Image: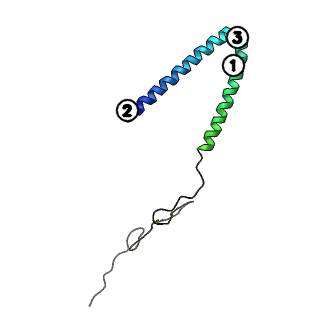
């Protein structure tokens, strides 16, 4: 399936290049046919519309790609862990802990006399 997708992207790229080339040739022919003065005026107007269209698409892309400011849903256990800001030191995020938690080197173990 990856080969099919790669081929369709390649075909789409070649099709786009062919359309762009045909548009350039047609526009060049038209500009030569109508004369440089009229062609210059038309190119200015077309350039303004293309610029405005590009600006609109850029604004749309910037607005649509912003992440939403919603809190994530709690996990399967019904809780949500989150750390924000600057943290100095050790941090533990957990749902269920059995036993103790130790940070750093373990304390030396002393055996007590048993009678």
- Residue 29: image quadrant is top right
Going from N to C along the chain, the mark reached first, 1 or 2, is: 2
- Residue 77: image quadrant is bottom left
Q: Position of residue 114 (x, y in %)?
A: 27, 88
Residue that label 2 marks: 3
Q: Which of the pair 15/56 is nearer the observer?
A: 15
Q: Position of residue 32 (x, y in %)?
A: 65, 9
Q: Describe residue 40's horizontal placement relative to residue 95 as left or right.
A: right
Label drawn at residue 69: none
Q: Residues within 10 Å of mark 1 (few under 14, many from 20)?
A: some
Q: Describe residue 57's horizontal placement relative to residue 21 as left or right.
A: right
The Cα atoms of the two marked residues, 3 and 1, are separated by: 10 Å
Residue that label 3 marks: 36
Q: Position of residue 67 (x, y in %)?
A: 58, 49
The Cα atoms of the two marked residues, 1 and 2, are separated by: 41 Å
The answer to whether 70 is drawn above or below residue 108 in the figure is above
- Residue 30: image quadrant is top right
SS at mark 2 in the image: helix
Mark 3 in CB contact with mark 1 (< 8 angstroms): no
Going from N to C along the chain, the mark reached first, 3 or 2, is: 2
Q: Position of residue 21 (x, y in %)?
A: 55, 18
The answer to whether 10 is drawn above or below residue 72 in the figure is above
Residue at (68, 22) in percent of width and height: 46
Disc tally is: 3
Mark 3 in CB contact with mark 2 (< 8 angstroms): no
Going from N to C along the chain, the mark reached first, 3 or 1, is: 3
SS at mark 1 in the image: helix
Residue that label 1 marks: 43
SS at mark 3 in the image: helix
The Cα atoms of the two marked residues, 3 and 2, are separated by: 47 Å
Q: Which of the pair 112/51 is nearer the observer?
A: 51
């Amino acid at each position: 399936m990856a080969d099919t997708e790669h081929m369709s992207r390649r075909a789409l790229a070649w099709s786009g290049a062919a359309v762009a080339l045909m548009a350039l040739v047609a526009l060049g022919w038209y500009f030569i046919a109508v004369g440089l003065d009229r062609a210059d005026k038309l190119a200015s107007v077309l350039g303004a519309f293309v610029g405005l269209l590009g600006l609109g698409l850029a604004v749309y892309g910037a607005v649509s790609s912003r992440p939403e400011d919603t809190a994530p849903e709690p996990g399967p256990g019904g809780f949500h862990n989150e750390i924000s800001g600057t943290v100095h030191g050790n941090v533990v995020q957990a749902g269920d802990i059995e036993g103790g938690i130790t940070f750093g080197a373990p304390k030396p173990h002393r055996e007590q006399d048993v009678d």
